[in-house]
C-alpha cells in the first residue's frame, strides 16, 4: 500500500509538471529572443526533430507544437505555433517558393514564412483526413518542385499525390490489377502496405517506395503507373531508398549491411557492395554531385561507393573505439560531405551468423570532418568533447536551451559551412550536374525472350523478301505474256532494221557527196544521190512519226492498230493484235532475212559488173562497228503496187556497198 501511494504521488507530480510546461510553451512569443528554458529539468525534454537545411543557410526543426527556424550560428530566426504535435522522426521538407511541409500527427502542415508578422496565417493544414475516413499514421512525405506535387504515404491507406494548390492528382496502393494480372504484393497481399517514405527522382520523374513484403516500386510522378517492381525480399523486408538522380536508385539494407544500385529505368540490380554494420535508427546515405554514395558505419568508417560500385573507406585506419551512428550531410557545393565520428569509452563487436552487432559505452569525444569522397581530400576536421561543449560558433547561441545530439550539431556545422573552401551552388545547379551523369536508355518496344523476338523479326524479314520477289516475278511474267501476244518481237526487229537502213544511207550519201566535190560525176550518179536522199528522208519519217510497219505487208492484211515509235524523247508502244503465233513470227523473220540476203548479193554482183564496164570502182560504204555486226535484223524485201521493189541493203561483217537502184519486173 505505501508503495502504491508513492507511485500515485509521483504520477500526480509528473502530470502537474508536464501541464505547467505546456502552458509555458504556449506563452512563447514569435520573437525568437523571448524563447528560453527556465530549468535543467525542462531542458531534458527539449529535443529537436530531424533538421532541414535549405539553400538560405538556415536550419529548420520542430519541437512538439512549435516550429523553429534557426540561423546557421544557432540563433532563432522565427518560430510559429503548429496547433498539432509534429512528428520528430520525419524531417521537414522544402516545398519551393520558401514554403515548408512537415508531418504533424495524422496531418501535413504547410508553413509560409512570408506570412509571419502579417494578418494572414503562416501555418495551414495541407492534408487532413475527411471526417469519417479511416485515419492512418503518416509514414513519410516528399515534394517535387519540378512537377509541383506533394506525395504523402499514409500507413494502410496508400500513396497520395497532391498538387501544391491542394487538389489530389491520384492515389495508389501496393497492389495494382492490370490486364488481368496482379502487380505488387505477390506473396501476401492481405497485410501488405507501403512502409517507407516516398523519395523523388527529379531526373527520371519517378517516385520510389517499398512495401512490407520487400518489394521496391518505381512509379510515375503524373499517374499511378508502376514503371517496375523489384522483389528484394530475399535480402530483407526493410530498406532505405535513396534516389541517385544519375540514372541509378540506391537501396540500403541495414540488417545485411549491403548497398545495392538499381537501374532507374528497369529496376535491374547493377551492383551491390558490402559495408560495415549499420545503425538501424539512422543510416540514410547521401549522394553527391559526382554520383558517389556515402554512408557511415558502426565500425568507425565512412563508406563511399562510386557510381560503378567501387568502394572506399575514410579514414584509412580508424581507431577501434570509433563509431559513425548518424547520417552525413552534403555541403553547399554538392561535392563534399560532413561526417561525425564518436569515440566511445569501450566498444565490443559480436558476429552471429551473417550479422554483426556493436555494443558501446558512453561517448568521450566527437570528431567532425569535411571531405570529398571522389578524391579523398579532407578540408577540415575538429574534435569536441562529448560532455556538451559546442563549437565556438555555437557556444552563445539559442541552442544551449535544447538537448543536442550529434545529428543536430552536424546540421549546424554544415549550415555554417565551417572549413569549406568550395563555392556554394543552388539546388538546381546540383541537380543539373547529377542528372548529366545519367546514361541514355534505349527502350525496347518488345518484352519477353530475346531469342524468340530475334527469330520472329528474322521470320518477318524473310516473309517480306519472299513476297517482294513473288510480286516482282508475277509482274514481269504478266508483262512478257502481254507483250508476246501483241507481236512485239516482229515490231522490234523491223524497227531495228529501219535504223540500220538509215545509218547505211547516211554513209553512202556522205561518200557520194565527197566524190561529187572532188571530181566531175555523170548525171546518173547525181540522180542516184538524189534517190538516196529521198529514201533516207522516208526512213526518217517512219522512225519519227506514228507509223505502222504493217504498211509493208500486202493490202489484204488488215491493220488493227498503229505503233507509236521512238521519237528521240519518249517511248510509247502500242501493239497489233495479230492472229499469228510467236513461232510463226520468228519463221517469217528468218525467211525474209534469207530472201533479203539473196537479193542483196545479186545486187552487189550487178553493181560490180557495171563498175568494171565504166572503168570505175564501186562506191564503198564504211563498215559498221563490231557491236552492230553482231546484231541481227530482218532483211526482207517488200514490193509495191507499181511493180517496183524497194531496195534491200545488207550490213555485212566488214563493209557494205551501195549500188544504183534498178527496176525489177514482178514475177507474180
Image: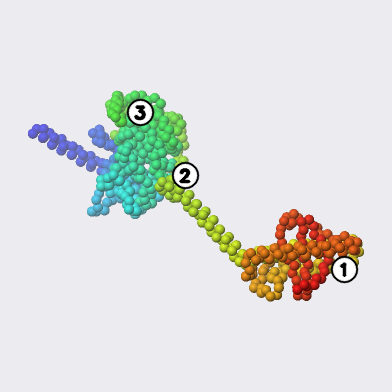
Among the 4 quarters of the image, the one containing residue 306: top left
State the residue in front, 522 or 165.
522
Badge 1 crowding class, 10 Å Cα cut-off, few under 14, some 14 to 19, many 20 or more, is: few
Expressed as whole percent of the image width and height from the top left, the position of residue 613 reads 90, 63
Say left or right for 573 vs 369: right
- For label 1, the residue is 524
Q: Which residue is mark 3?
A: 300
Farthest-out residue, left: 1
- Density class for disc 3 (Cα within 10 Å; few <14, some 14-19, many ≥20) is many
Q: Quadrant of the N terminus?
A: top left
Up-down relation of residue 372 to residue 532 (above or below): above
| Element under disc 2 | loop
**Cα separation between marks 2 and 3:** 37 Å
Residue furthest front as drawn: 667
Residue 515 screen position, x and y as percent: 87, 61
**Of marks 2 and 1, which one's residue comes earlier in the chain?**
2
Residue located 43% across and 49% down the image: 446
Q: Nearer the viewer, residue 575 or 446?
A: 575
Whole-percent x, y for residue 600 in the image: 78, 63
SS at badge 3: loop
For the C terminus, which image quadrant? Answer: bottom right
294 shown above or below 152: above
User: What scheme was used to colour the molecule?
Assistant: rainbow
Q: Earlier in the sequence, mark 2 or mark 3?
A: 3
For residue 440, which numbered disc appears in the image? 2
Image: 555 above or below 384: below
The percent coordinates of residue 275 (x first, y second) are 36, 31
Q: Toward the viewer: 451 or 334?
A: 451
Which residue appears at 12% of the width and 33% of the height?
6
Q: Nearer the viewer, mark 2 or mark 3?
A: 2
Name the element at disc 1.
helix
Amino acid at each position: 500500500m505505501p508503495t502504491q501511494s508513492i507511485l500515485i504521488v509521483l504520477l500526480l507530480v509528473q502530470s502537474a509538471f508536464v501541464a505547467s510546461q505546456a502552458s509555458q510553451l504556449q506563452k512563447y512569443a514569435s520573437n525568437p529572443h523571448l524563447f528560453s528554458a527556465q530549468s535543467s529539468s525542462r531542458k531534458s525534454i527539449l529535443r529537436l526533430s530531424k533538421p532541414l537545411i535549405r539553400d538560405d543557410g538556415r536550419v529548420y526543426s520542430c519541437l512538439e507544437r512549435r516550429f523553429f527556424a534557426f540561423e546557421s550560428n544557432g540563433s532563432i530566426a522565427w518560430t510559429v505555433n503548429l496547433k498539432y504535435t509534429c512528428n520528430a522522426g520525419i524531417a521537414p521538407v522544402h516545398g519551393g517558393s520558401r514554403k515548408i511541409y512537415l508531418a504533424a500527427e495524422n496531418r501535413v502542415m504547410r508553413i509560409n514564412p512570408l506570412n509571419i508578422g502579417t494578418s494572414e496565417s503562416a501555418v495551414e493544414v495541407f492534408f487532413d483526413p475527411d471526417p469519417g475516413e479511416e485515419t492512418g499514421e503518416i509514414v513519410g512525405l516528399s515534394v517535387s518542385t519540378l512537377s509541383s506535387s506533394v506525395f504523402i504515404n499514409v500507413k494502410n491507406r496508400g500513396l497520395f499525390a497532391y498538387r501544391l494548390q491542394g487538389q489530389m492528382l491520384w492515389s495508389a496502393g501496393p497492389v495494382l490489377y492490370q490486364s488481368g494480372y496482379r502487380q505488387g504484393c505477390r506473396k501476401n497481399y492481405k497485410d501488405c502496405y507501403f512502409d517507407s517514405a516516398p523519395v523523388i527522382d527529379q531526373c527520371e520523374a519517378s517516385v520510389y517506395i517499398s512495401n512490407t513484403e520487400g518489394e521496391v516500386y518505381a512509379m510515375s510522378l503524373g499517374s499511378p503507373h508502376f514503371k517496375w517492381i523489384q522483389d528484394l525480399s530475399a535480402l530483407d523486408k526493410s530498406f532505405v531508398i535513396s534516389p541517385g538522380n544519375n540514372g541509378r536508385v540506391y537501396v540500403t539494407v541495414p540488417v545485411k549491411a549491403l548497398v545495392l544500385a538499381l537501374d532507374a529505368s528497369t529496376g535491374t540490380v547493377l551492383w551491390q557492395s558490402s559495408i560495415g554494420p549499420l545503425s538501424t535508427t539512422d543510416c540514410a546515405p547521401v549522394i553527391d554531385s559526382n554520383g558517389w554514395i556515402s554512408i557511415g558505419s558502426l565500425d568507425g568508417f565512412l563508406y563511399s561507393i562510386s557510381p560503378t560500385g567501387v568502394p572506399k573507406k575514410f579514414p584509412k585506419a580508424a581507431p577501434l573505439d570509433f563509431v559513425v551512428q548518424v547520417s552525413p550531410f552534403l555541403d553547399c557545393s554538392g561535392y563534399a560531405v560532413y561526417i561525425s565520428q564518436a569515440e566511445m569509452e569501450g566498444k565490443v563487436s559480436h558476429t552471429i551468423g551473417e550479422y554483426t552487432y556493436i555494443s558501446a559505452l558512453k561517448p568521450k569525444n566527437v570528431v567532425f570532418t569535411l571531405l570529398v569522397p571522389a578524391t579523398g581530400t579532407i578540408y577540415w576536421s575538429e574534435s569536441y568533447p562529448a560532455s556538451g561543449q559546442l563549437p565556438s560558433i555555437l557556444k552563445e547561441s539559442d541552442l544551449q536551451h535544447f538537448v543536442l545530439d550529434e545529428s543536430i550539431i552536424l546540421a549546424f556545422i554544415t549550415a555554417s559551412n565551417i572549413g569549406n573552401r568550395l563555392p556554394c551552388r543552388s539546388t538546381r545547379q546540383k541537380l543539373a550536374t547529377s542528372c548529366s551523369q545519367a546514361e541514355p536508355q534505349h527502350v525496347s518496344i518488345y518484352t519477353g525472350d530475346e531469342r524468340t523476338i530475334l527469330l520472329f523479326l528474322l521470320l518477318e524479314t524473310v516473309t517480306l523478301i519472299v513476297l517482294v520477289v513473288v510480286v516482282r516475278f508475277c509482274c514481269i511474267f504478266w508483262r512478257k505474256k502481254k507483250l508476246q501476244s501483241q507481236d512485239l518481237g516482229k515490231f522490234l526487229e523491223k524497227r531495228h532494221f529501219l535504223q540500220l537502213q538509215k545509218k547505211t544511207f547516211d554513209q553512202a550519201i556522205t561518200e557520194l557527196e565527197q566524190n561529187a566535190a572532188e571530181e566531175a560525176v555523170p548525171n546518173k550518179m547525181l540522180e542516184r544521190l538524189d534517190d538516196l536522199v529521198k529514201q533516207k528522208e522516208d526512213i526518217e519519217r517512219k522512225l519519227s512519226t506514228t507509223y505502222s510497219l504493217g504498211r509493208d505487208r500486202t493490202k489484204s492484211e488488215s491493220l488493227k492498230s498503229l505503233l507509236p515509235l521512238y521519237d528521240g524523247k519518249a517511248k510509247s508502244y502500242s501493239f497489233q493484235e495479230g492472229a499469228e503465233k510467236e513461232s510463226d513470227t520468228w519463221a517469217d523473220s528468218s525467211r525474209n532475212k534469207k530472201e533479203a540476203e539473196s537479193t542483196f548479193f545479186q545486187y552487189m554482183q550487178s553493181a560490180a559488173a557495171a563498175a568494171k564496164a565504166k572503168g570505175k570502182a564501186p562506191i564503198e560504204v564504211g563498215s559498221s562497228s563490231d557491236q552492230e555486226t553482231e546484231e541481227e535484223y530482218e532483211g526482207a524485201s517488200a514490193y509495191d503496187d507499181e511493180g517496183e521493189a524497194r531496195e534491200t541493203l545488207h550490213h555485212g561483217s566488214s563493209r557494205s556497198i551501195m549500188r544504183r537502184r534498178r527496176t525489177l519486173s514482178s514475177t507474180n
